[in-house]
Image (cartoon, grey):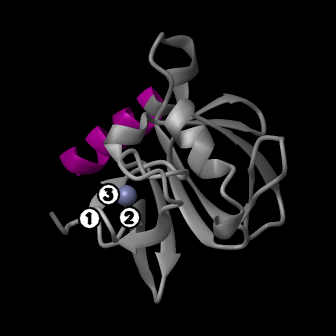
């Protein structure tokens, strides 16, 4: 009983989160819709579209057309109704579902064996890196 009262208090605190300076953290899930030159969106199971934003590296990942149509999961917070700010890229808050598992989006250069977290040319040989979805628990 005491536990459920605690949970209720937490729930009320979460609802009141909008009044505090710290926005309530949440997770959004759905299909990624990548646009050319416009912010990517998530289409939820209820067919609601949520516009995604994040830091610069996250924005680069969000504009990668190879990720279009993937089921994704993003942690962060809403900045407005229908607008979602993803947590910084080093917190690994943007994950892609593949074969029923959540994967981290990484980019790999197999010539230099260098891994990057944003799409684009390899920092070493300037060759285009390949998309490499990885288990987030892997080192
Ligand atoms: Zn390279």
Which percent across, then down, holds residue 135? 30, 72
- Tell me the element at label 3: strand
- Distance Cα–Cα, label 2 vs label 1: 5 Å
Q: Magenta segment, which residues?
A: 1-13
Identify the residue at image location x=29%, y=49%: 4
Q: Is residue 124 above or below residue 42?
A: above
In the rendered view, does 4 fall on the left or right side of 66?
A: left
Give the label, 3 or 2, closer to the camera. Answer: 2
Per the image, the residue denoted by label 2 is: 109
- Distance Cα–Cα, label 3 vs label 1: 7 Å
Q: Nearer the viewer, residue 46 or 114?
A: 114
Are the residues tagged 3 and 2 within 8 Å (C-beta)? yes
Per the image, the residue denoted by label 1 is: 113
- Distance Cα–Cα, label 3 vs label 2: 6 Å
Identify the residue at image location x=55%, y=12%: 19
Per the image, the residue denoted by label 3 is: 115
Which percent across, then down, holds residue 37? 83, 42
Q: Residue furthest left?
A: 139
């Amino acid at each position: 009983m005491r536990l459920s009262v605690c949970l209720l208090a937490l729930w009320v605190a979460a609802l009141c989160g909008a009044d505090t300076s710290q926005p309530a953290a949440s997770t959004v899930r759905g299909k990624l819709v990548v646009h050319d030159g416009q912010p990517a969106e998530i289409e939820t199971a209820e067919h609601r579209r949520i516009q995604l934003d994040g830091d610069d590296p996250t924005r680069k990942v969000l504009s990668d057309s190879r990720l279009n149509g993937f089921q994704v999961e993003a942690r962060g917070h809403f900045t407005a109704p229908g607008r979602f700010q993803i947590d910084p890229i080093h917190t690994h808050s943007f994950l892609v579902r593949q074969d029923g598992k959540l994967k981290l989006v990484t980019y790999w250069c197999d010539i230099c064996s260098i891994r990057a977290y944003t799409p684009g040319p390899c920092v070493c040989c300037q060759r285009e890196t390949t998309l490499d979805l990885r288990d987030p628990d892997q080192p």
